[in-house]
Image (spheres, coloured by chain):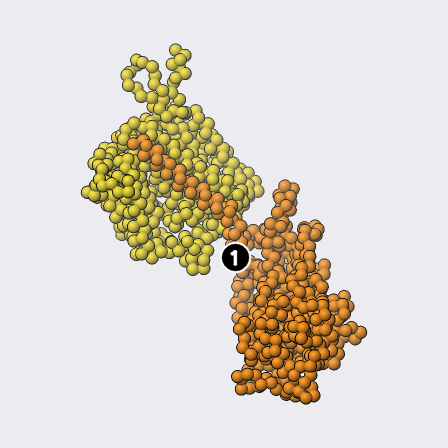
Amino acid sequence: MNSPIRRLSAIAAALFFCLLVSSSWIQFAAAKKINDLPDNKRTLLASYNRERGSILVGGEAIARSVATDGELKWDRRYPMAQLYSHVTGYYSYVYGAGGGIEGAEDELLSGRSDKLFYRRVSDLLTGKDPVGASLELTINPAAQTAADRGLGTQRGAVVALDPKTGAILAMVSHPAYDPAELSSHDIGAVEKAWPRLLKDEGDPLINRSIAGDLYPPGSTFKLVTAAAALESGTYTQNSTVPGPATLQLPGVAAPLANHDRAPCGPNDKTTLIHALEISCNTAFASLGMQLGAEALREQAGKFGFGQTLTVPMRATASSVPANMNEPNTAQAAIGQYDVRTTPLQMAMVAAAIGNGGEVMKPYLVRRVLGSQLQTIDEATPERLSEAVSTSTARQLTTMMKDVVTSGTGTAAQIAGVDVAGKTGTAQHAKGAAPHAWFVSFAPAADPKVAVAVVVEDGGNAGSEASGGAVAGPIAKSVMEAVLNS
Amino acid sequence: MSVVTSLRPRRGRNVELLLLLFAVAIITLAYATVEASANGAWPANLATQVGGVLAIAVVFHLVLRWTASYADPLLLPIATLLNGLGLVMIHRLDIAKGNELGEGMALRQLTWSALGVAIAIGVLLWLRDHRTLRRYTFLAGTAGVVLLLLPLFPFIGREINGARIWIGLGPFSFQPGEIAKIVLAVFFAGYLVRTRDVLSIAGPRVLGMQFPRGRDLGPILLMWAISLAVLFWQKDLGSALLFFGLFVAMLYVATERVGWIAIGLLLAAGGAVIAFRLFGHVQTRVLLWLHTFSPEAVAQSDQLAKGLMGMASGGLLGTGLGQGRPYITYFAESDFIIASFGEELGLVGLMAILILYVLLAERGFRIAVGVRDGFGKLLAAGLAFSLTLQCFVVVGGVTRVIPLTGLTMPFLSSGGSSLLANWTLVALLLRISDQARQPVLDTADSGPVPAAVGGR
């Protein structure tokens, strides 16, 4: 019986070997994946054991950890609560880290990131309590405040960018919320606040500037159509284009009309520059049909449409639908039909035009800082794509300057500064007031800031709203804030 | 004369004592670490507690010197170490639950450990020759079946956490399946040693493998049916697997026919399919096994997910004893104690513990090879394999090699029946090893002293 016993003992050894392999898999190979699972209570609890890094704006903490005596050793505080709610997000014992930088850069803030590996090892050796990394953001506090005040009680969003680097200078979404409500150690209160915020019909937890249901861009999309026309080589800013009061679309009963139902120029004709200045629907609709759906989509793609960006939060991709027929293309060319965009994307369009045609990748974290505020990592501006040629960018700038000096965007004028802008008044549902849009950059010749503003349902102005009147002043105050700081 | 002295077979008792001291030292260190991390100080009563554990171990050691002086020197130290580590972890979980030393699970476990050791000593004193057990073959068989069925009887049977494998007598509850494991190993050994000649008669040859005759399939089919019955009525996947696997392995050892293993695997696969089709609880287990972290699985039970998260958080080196959060997982002190060790001692510590089990099992097989009688061989191999299979079913369930089943980890898990059974198992192995390693005394005092068997 000895040989089967020996074989049985080999089988036993093989069974044990399986266990060694499986436990190695769990505790070594797959450990990181398991630790990063969203519902992992241990990872969350462990993160409360160590001082979480701060989130800094202009040298001040907008999120920081304060030591407590409780079981959770650190309490998260948001000194400017509502102003930065969609930038910071929340850090909740119950619901995890999410809603902004807290979620997107959790690994750095909690100190789990591989980027901090050498620091962790040295902390281990020197016996220091490990600390998460702090993050310095690109936000300009004055611009953020201006955007927040400008929106006031209106729903909508503002994004401001540095056109040359892609640094995000302001990111505001209204309605906002107080992240402290979700980050409190009072579990009962947190568990009441969460469903209330989720059910709130204003959707305060959604960051409208980069996510949510997205918006039709309305006339601000004419910038993309104009860019496609100029890039095609057949048009210049002074080319004559048709501009009747109404435009019959093939196969559609109701004609497409200008908002004032008047022709855009004598003999139903106008120039491209004038068409943009007064936001002539019929001119851009026929231009769209002339260029074709593919040319529009391609141009939009060069500006960043169709790309999901991480800023580091995930920004939903803006989109121009594929396989459009002629009437759909005409509607899309004026930013209607199913064109959907984030305010961030429209800010990128304005920024690219101001930056000589180059789209810079937007980012929110300027520097990663260690416990002694020494720099661990610094963001380097990254080029995303070339949207248009320099000459197209120059012509678009001239056209956008005209919008602000003598067109629909006069509300955004700043004394002594050339502002380039474009208004938008986007129909989105029958009977609902239109969304008011404004995108711009300044100074036109050497821009320091590009802005996109959207105010939902016309804001306080309701159905009387127009992009210039409602969104224009907000864009102006944000640009001024950047230029004055 | 000096030549004869040098040939004196090594009994290994001094090695055993040394290893025992080493085991108690490790337990002491672990206990002190837990206390230090909970209270920030070494425990004041460390000396008395360590003294108590040491005393129990040394008494056992002395009994071995007296009644089984050739017994394998590794079994007792390994069992002591595992039992002690289990106690430390259970005590550590007591602290996390806010239980004082006097009222927690650890004290109960300590009582059961002492009782287990006492019973093991009793077995060694009563059973001077393991072959005596062969006389009780059919008594053991009957007892095994009765023990298995006890939980199904009204009044004493209890269903705890969905498995009807407990019996309750007043405040005590007991898992008779643990004892049944040993009693059935005795029965299988006695039965197979009688019938092995018949069962190994060659039958048809299929795929180059010699299969037994069709008429000899009765016992394995019966065992298969009993295992399925256990699975169906007691909802106990682990025990069903353990009993059937044990029987097939012992059948193979007795008959030396690989065909039996093939038939066993086939029947097990068939049983698995039937069980999966018919029993909802088996389907749930499979869902939890394959898609542990999916929302559907977590909605059923997040125990396995939490155990895995605990092990992952331990990583290579662990959080350190008393520093992790094993208490987040349910049954961290019993079914999931392996995950608790993985979390706090890391992969390194967990591997060390698994190696201890490997040593224990492989010593068992070595004893089986060394002992001379067929009954002893079968019993030792069966006991060693049952230990292996139980470890595989428990740790494999926790680490997602197989679906999770409810068995205890020998010596580590909290639970009295498990401790009693496993100490008895070690006592039986010690008794058999005493004979396996004894020099053969063919003639009274003439001729050279033969070399020790298995004494290396």
Residue of label 1: A38
Could you say which chain is coloured yellow in the image?
B
In the shown orientation, is residue A98 left or right of residue A484?
A: left
Which residue appears at 68% of the width and 56% of the height? A379
Query: Which amino acid, mark 1?
Result: Pro
Rendered location of residue A290, percent (x, y): 61, 78
Q: Nearer the viewer, residue B393 or A420?
A: A420
Question: Which quadrant holds residue B179?
Answer: top left
Question: Which quadrant holds residue B82?
Answer: top left
Rendered location of residue B148, percent (x, y): 28, 45
Q: Secondary structure at mark 1?
A: loop
**Chain A as rendered: colour:** orange
User: On screen, A149 above or below B44?
Assistant: below
Q: Nearer the viewer, residue B36 or A169?
A: A169
Which residue appears at 21% of the width and 36% of the height? B201
Q: Quadrant of the N terminus of chain B?
A: top left
Rendered location of residue B213, percent (x, y): 21, 41
Q: Residue furthest front?
A: A234
Which residue appears at 38% of the width and 24% of the height? B455
Chain under disc 1: A
